Image (cartoon, grey):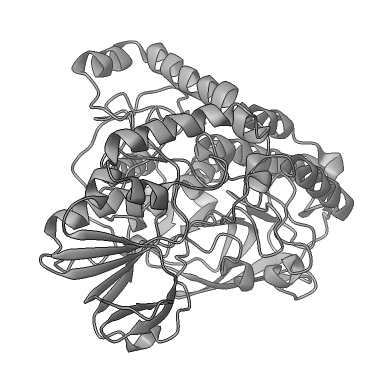
Amino acid sequence: MSAPGSALRTDPVRPPRPAPLPLPDHVRIAIVGAGFSGLGAAVALTDEGYGDDLILLERRSDVGGTWHDNSYPGCRCDVPSNLYSFSFAPNPNWSETYSGQPEIERYLQVTARQYGVTDRVAFDTTLDAALWDVTRRVWRIATSRGSLTADLLISGGGFLSEPHVPALPGRETFAGTTFHSAQWNHAHDLTGRKVAIVGTGASTIQFLPIVQKSAGHVTLFQRTPPWVFPHANRPTRAVERLTYTRWPWTQKVSRARNYWFREAVLGSLLIHNSRKLRKLERLAEKFMDHQVADPALRAKLTPTYTPGCKRLLQSNDYYPALQRPNVRLETEKIVQVHPGGLVTADGVLHEADTIIYGTGFRATDNPMAEKLRGVDGRSLKEHWAPSGMQAYCGTTIAGFPNFFMLAGPNTGIGHTSLVIMIEAQVRHIVGAIRSLKAQGARVIEVRPDVMASWNAELQRKATPTVWNSGGCSSWYLDAAGRNTTLWPDHTYRFVRRTRTFDASDYVLTGPVMMGPRLSS
């Protein structure tokens, strides 16, 4: 990628937005999404010579993806900043060791400008549908701003992009204000409000302590308690930022140290569902004992599953916030939404004028799968229905030629940075495009037997992991109990498997074509 290892320039001033990018009739490469995945792909493909013949279709008004959407108070990454960033665009000026949402969003905006990608983004452009044209061998793409065709289609939307709101009876009757944490209503003043928060996942433990400070009363509805650990975030020191700027190799060392610690320690524990996870459990219990004095409350907050089965959460102020006089933890099941609040299974109406859903995302039933139709005219959702989401290297899918998915099935990570997986996938895509050019082919499609073998191997590996066998129900698993989201192994093995593109895993066809030929 361009200028590997060069430091990212700080640029706090956002330039004026240019006029909306016109949609071309045809483009070589169309990328959906301008978050980490889409931007990483665009930079790599620009280096390959396709910068003038690609377009990013972004439904939002700016780059940033999930870090643009999730602007709720207290939003922060739970992976160290030096690791949760592009390897080719290090930032020596992170203000904290675990960056907050505004700083990550700004990092992506600056990176997009520095690498010349911003000018290739069609903002406010939502993908409505994409159909593989068997005759012309192109993708026919319909968007909210018009239509176009593309030789190659890359999905960079990810599976944590569509908020999940539970279908509670009476939801539409609520008389107050309702929103999801990923669609935070900043215009709604919570001062003095009676707030109901549904869900106790990664988002809630970050925004609850802030909401609690201004709300009149907060009722937190917990279905399953999370394992919570101390957060190690701190401000970066001036000497650290200066060292990273003057000697960039030191930041690479920091990144490598963070990476290998998580692989060797945390990754090994989770992947093998090690007995040593009991040490993590004791650490979390000791942390809770220190922060929560009431034994009855501790009992409600103590999970019954193995740490890591659900996402491990980090917070220093979640437990203290729960014990404020204006906060109440409710563990009864919600059975109905009432105009004046939420009704639980014991018949109690919990009054509220604001409901905030901290209920995660549609990870295993993302609507993107409904919008894509392959060679047989069926949607990707229909293809996946019998056996769950699957893709070779999390990237390519039989029956969907010239289509690549970033942050796809089984590329999620439970112990380290997703950016590592994204960059590995991007290298795989670059290898595919180079093979197309080298062989003068028009179409590339993964062999069905290769994809089936890959998925069978994944499911075998997933069975003993803590995510499958830790005694919980999580968004990592689909309705049939299959792990279709997480990579059930060390990430370095994924990087190694995708480093060299093997054309024998694919069927390449052409060169006869009716549309433009894929070439530089």
Q: Position of residue 142 (x, y in %)?
A: 55, 74
Query: If the image is split into quadrants, where does the C terminus sit?
Result: top right
Vertical order, 28 against 479 (above or below): above
Would residue 73 be seen by someone viewing this image from the given angle? no
- Is 252 situated left or right of 245 in this image? right
- Most distant residue in the front direction: 295
Q: Residue at x 39, y 23 (%)?
A: 6
Looking at this view, is 105 or 154 the one in front?
105
Q: Residue at x 23, y 68 (%)?
A: 195
Q: Position of residue 9 (x, y in %)?
A: 28, 30
Classify residue 451 as left or right of residue 47. Answer: right
* Picture residue at 63% right of the left edge, 53% below the top: 405
The picture places residue 100, in percent across and down from the top left corner, at: 29, 41
Quarter residue 254 falls in = top left
Q: Position of residue 20 (x, y in %)?
A: 34, 65
Q: Using the image as rendered, state which of residue 283 and residue 258 is in the foreground.
A: 283
User: In this rendering, does residue 237 appear at all?
Assistant: yes
Observer-nearest of 406 and 124: 406
What residue appears at the point 45 percent right and 60 percent down from the top-left corner? 360
Question: Image quarter for residue 178?
Answer: bottom left
How many numbered marks, from 0 up?
0
Q: Is residue 155 above or below residue 165?
A: above
